[in-house]
Amino acid sequence: MLWLSFMHCPSLPEGCLLQQENSNQNDSPDMAKNYYASFFLFFTVLISIMPKSYQQSTDQYSDEHQILLGLERYWGSSPVLGRWNSTSSDYCSWGGVTCMNGMVTAISLANQNFSKSIPTSLCLLKNLNYLDLSYNNFSTSFPTILYNCSKLMYLDLSNNVFAGHLPADINSLSASLSTNHITGRIPTSIGWFPRLKSLQLDANQFDGSNPSKGISNLTNLEVLTLAENPFRPAPVPVEFGKLTRLTYLWLSGMNMTGEIPESLSSLTELTLLSMSNNKLNGTILTWIWQHKKLQYL
């Protein structure tokens, strides 16, 4: 009914009063007051409702600006953070920051010499789906606080100094964790990433048996690196033949024994296959030479 009243009186409340006076000059002053009251109520309701989403959006822009400034204060000056301008509200133009519709969706801060742990405030960026913190000096255990980044789809923590074990609920994230000091066994939950395309766990200190059964369930994988880990001696995983989308398979230096299984002949998309520094025997199978896309062996 408020909208209908507005359509009948498109101008200010005085216009509605004038229209009423022209139609019936004998109306009482109380009637005029009612018109004023009605439109005062209408515009009060309109103002209280319409700007609400705008206000929320403005608040979020302000919040994200302050979150980024908080990261700069926490980690200190670096080649990228040193150029973040606290006097500029256009944080989407800052180095290492990518936005969509004014919201931060990606942060790329590789090789910044960070050593302080990853702060919980990072996950207050509610639309963050890409995070690259590779080639820094993080030395804590695996940062499970990143589980709070609910929209995170890509995480690169490679070439840091993370230590300790991978948590059993690592399936909460997809990540590149190569070249760290992570020890222990790779948990079976690593196989619970239905959309994972890249799994890079090379150059750590994983031991125990290689997690071939879990990983073989990741049928969307395109990149798999398990190289340079002291796994328990075991044959080349037959199960990896299921990973038919692989283009990059690096299995060097992980104590594999025996022959290369025929099941890997199904990996026709491979451009790189490396199994050096293992204890393999037998002859090179003819199917390897028939893979037209294979460039590095």
Image (cartoon, rainbow, N blue to C red):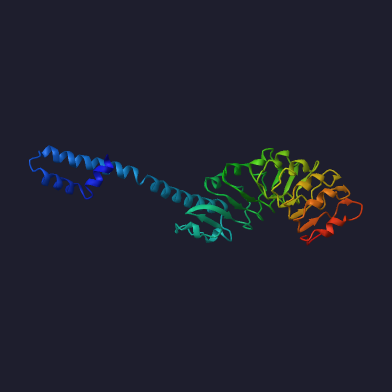
Residue 236: where, in percent of width, then height? 84, 47
In which quarter of the view is residue 291 placed?
Answer: bottom right
Give left or right: position of 139 versus 80.
right
Residue closest to the eye, 163 or 212: 212
| Number of on-image labels | 0
- Using residue 62 as the reference point, say whether residue 120 is left or right of it: right
Location of residue 115 with respect to 167 vertically, above or below? below
Residue 137 horizontal/vertical position (percent): 66, 53
Query: Which quadrant would the C terminus be assigned to in this image?
Result: bottom right
For image coordinates 41% across by 50% down, the residue present is: 58
Residue drawn at (76%, 59%) of the image: 271
Quarter that holds the N terminus: top left
Task: List x then y, in percent, for residue 162.
Answer: 69, 47
Residue 100: give x, y in percent of width and height: 50, 54
Task: Please indicate whether residue 129 sits to the left or right of residue 178 in the image.
Answer: left
Q: Nearer the viewer, residue 264 or 158?
A: 264
Compare residues 35 and 97 and report the one nearer the observer.
Answer: 35
Q: Residue at x 76, y 53 (%)?
A: 249
View extreme (left): residue: 26
Which residue is outermost to the right? Answer: 282
**Where on the picture, by quarter, is residue 213?**
top right
Residue placed most toward the observer, 153 or 169:
153
